[in-house]
Image: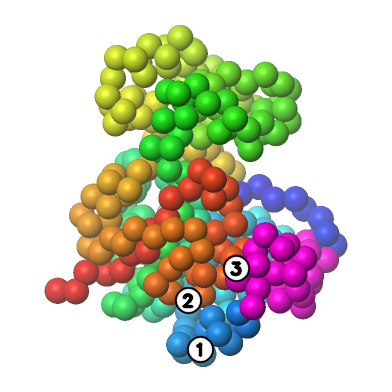
Amino acid sequence: MKYNKSKIRTKIRLRFLKYFDRSRYYLYPKFRVARDMTQPDFYREIANDALLLNIGAGEFFYHNKWKSYDLYEKYLTDNFEHFNNLDLRDTDASNLLPNSVDAIYFGHTIEHIPENKLDELLQFFHSILKQDGILRIVCPNADLIYDAYRQRRENFFAPYKSWFSARGQLKPSLEDYLLQLIATPKCQTYTAYDNSKTQISNSDVAYAAETMTKESFLDFLTSDLNEQNSSGTDHLNWFNHEKLRVILEKNGFNYNKSAFGQSVFPPFRQVPLFDETMPCISMYADVSKKKF
């Protein structure tokens, strides 16, 4: 991702996260569900040398037991030892070893992976995870998004209004919201690059929704989106539990539906360290390697 380049601002934020970790639960009372758990409670069953990865971690995630992996710029990896660069479009360049990773948190990142790269990525995760390792996937729930669009519930999309206002669009249509969440390059409001050749009109979206099944419609929206932009920020794919389950099982995983703040792996229950991104539109799954 393209992150702000203020080293001072980054240091201040990370220092706060590092030294005031427990305080966050008292500063944000809405996360009271987790605040009475101590750090040792979450990690009591986890080996001290466990390799724990947050892939697609963003700039401000910090926990001393976790390594952050993302499409980081060099100034971050040079100045902060917990930042590690990983381009999910080229996993062959990774230095992660087979059967070495105990857990992977993959939050709001899989929707950025085009359909033609998905198998390759999941096979990479399968190869680096230990046999009893856990992969937690969090992503937008396409069933919720589709239903809100079809029912014309604009209030469902309100959390994304700022994305449009920052781009000069103060009155986005429901089609704008839908495309931003499912197929960003086809959105009428977009400034990362010239997307005039990929945009689709509101009327074409509305007609497709009326004439197609849900799955066919969502596939129509994401069709031909095979390349991510340079900063990795486009949404190029859609998932509901059924689609995610099928592709994960095909790639050698057991699929277990989960929920916000719930996990078979105790550290993933650390809300808001994990699962903090848009729970109102999200779905959750914990997956593990199949045993042969």
How far apart in space, not on screen, are marks 2 and 1 (Cα)? 9 Å
Q: Image point 64% across, 78% down: which residue?
A: 36
Specify the segment rendered in magenta.
Answer: 10-36
Q: Image height check: is 57 above or below 167? A: below
The local secondary structure at tag 2 comes to helix
Mark 1 vs mark 3, foreground winner is: 3
For marks 2 and 1, the one nearer the N-term is 1
| Residue 9 percent across, percent down from the top left | 83, 59
Label 1 amino acid?
A: Arg
Instruction: From the image, tell me which residue sits under label 1.
Output: 44
Q: Image height check: is 132 above or below 83? A: below
Quadrant into which the C terminus falls: bottom left
Mark 2 touches mark 1? (CB < 8 Å): yes
For marks 3 and 2, the one nearer the N-term is 3
69 in magenta: no
- Depth check, front residue: 45 or 50: 45
Left or right: residue 225 compared with residue 275: left
16 in magenta: yes
Label 3 amino acid?
A: Val
Residue 266's label in the rendered image is 2
- Depth check, front residue: 50 or 89: 50
Q: What colour scheme has been applied to the protein in the rendered image?
A: rainbow
Instruction: From the image, tell me which residue sits under label 3.
Output: 33
How far apart in space, not on screen, are marks 3 and 2 (Cα)? 14 Å
The local secondary structure at tag 1 comes to loop
